[in-house]
Every structure is written in structure tokens, then in C-alpha cells.
Image: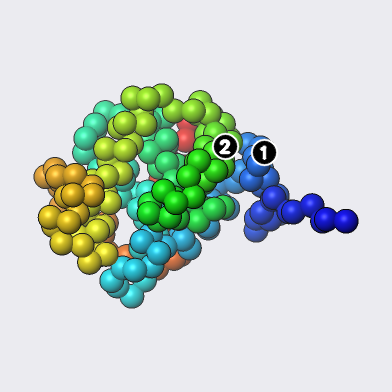
Amino acid sequence: MAKEPRVWQRMLSGRRLNLLDPSPLDVELDDIAHGLARVARWNGQTIGGHIFSVAQHSLLVEAIADHLDPDMPCATRLAVLLHDAPEYVIGDIISPFKAVIGDAYKTIEAGLLGAIHLHFGLPAAPSAALKRFIKQADRQAAYLEATHLAGFGREEAIKFFGRPESLPRGVHALLEPWPVAVAEERFRERVLSATP
């Protein structure tokens, strides 16, 4: 008799988050901050003494979004900060591998993001305009990370992520990889400050 596969992840909070049917009740900020601070962007293929974490990437994207729209409402800021939050459960899968996996990954990711959004009082599915806004800031962050941390040349990065905009120095300062504990705490603080 075949054994049923386990489709849930136990979190340090004690919650069990079901990947196929995630509940907002099983989402905790501490679990998200803890996980994202330990997940490496670019599969860890970055320079520096520390990984460049998804938590730090999320703060970089928020800083770019703030530059693009300094008057963005708290709900938008929160959605920007949480745009990669499902990765606290499923990790940061690089874009080339996502293309190979296809729709199964996108379905799981969308379900997790919906549960996370509902936990924080956001609509389960962001609007098309909000998705475009987050994607714009995310691509700018990817360009910066690629050229400053991941060994991409400028022209190669432009080909994959688009031509960069001029950004303030404060944004560039976020490219220095932080220790895990710093990334975890700063991410947690920013999410709390944006939560209504």
C-alpha cells in the first residue's frame, strides 16, 4: 500500500503549512522572516562573506519601489515586501529552473502568496497594476544584484533585466550582504511598520 506523501512543512513556530491548501492561520511573520533570511538569492553564487538573502532582496525591492512611488500606500508597501514571501517555504528557485518546472511551481507559489496576503489583511491576489509595479522594482533589484553581486556584466544584465534607472545611493547601500540575524530582524521590522 502506497504511503501518502507529506505535503506540509513544519515551521519553528509549530505551525504546519500545507503547500497544496495553505491557510492564512498557519502563516506567522517570525517564520517568514526566519526563513527568508536563510534563503540565498542566485543559489548563493554571490560575492561577500554572507549570502545575499531573499529577506534583504525584499528590502532592496521596497527601497526601489519607494523611489518609484514615494507616496505608495502601506498596503502597497506591504505587498512589495511580501512579493517573495512564499520562498520561506519553497526556497528561491532560479528563473531558468522555474521555466523548466512550469506551471506546477507557479500554482504552489500563488497559493502560498494568497494565504500570506490574507494573513496580513491584503487581497489574496494583487491587482494587475500592483503586479506590474512590483515587477518593475524587482527587475531593477535583479539588475543591481546581478552586476554588483552575481558576476554579470552590464550588457548581459540589461539583456535579462532591462536598462537600469538612476537610483539614490541609499538603494545601492542595500547591496552589501548582511549576516542572517540582521536580515531577519530588519525584514521583520519593515513588515511590522507597513502592517495596518
Residue shown at the point (26%, 37%) measured from the top left: 136
- Give left or right: position of 189 versus 23: left
* Residue 129 relative to residue 25: left or right: left
User: 115 or 70: nearer the eye?
Assistant: 115
Vertical position of residue 45 compared to residue 74: above or below: below
Pinpoint residue 183: horizontal percent, then vertical percent: 41, 59
Q: Residue furthest bottom?
A: 49
Distance from the alpha carbon under mark 2 to that under mark 1: 7 Å
Amino acid tagged 1: Asp
Res. 120 visible in picture: no
Residue 39 location (% of width, % of height): 46, 61
Question: Callout 2 environment at 10 Å: few (<14), some (14 to 19), or many (20+)?
Answer: some
Which disc is residue 114 wearing? none
Amino acid carrying mark 2 in the image: Gly
Q: Is residue 46 visible?
A: yes
- Mark 2 or mark 1: whose residue is earlier in sequence: 1
According to the picture, the residue beneath numbered tag 2 turns out to be: 111
Under circle 1, the secondary element is loop
Numbered circle sitting on residue 21: 1
Residue 83 screen position, x and y as percent: 42, 41
114 or 118: which is nearer to us? 114
Q: Which image quarter holds the N terminus? A: bottom right
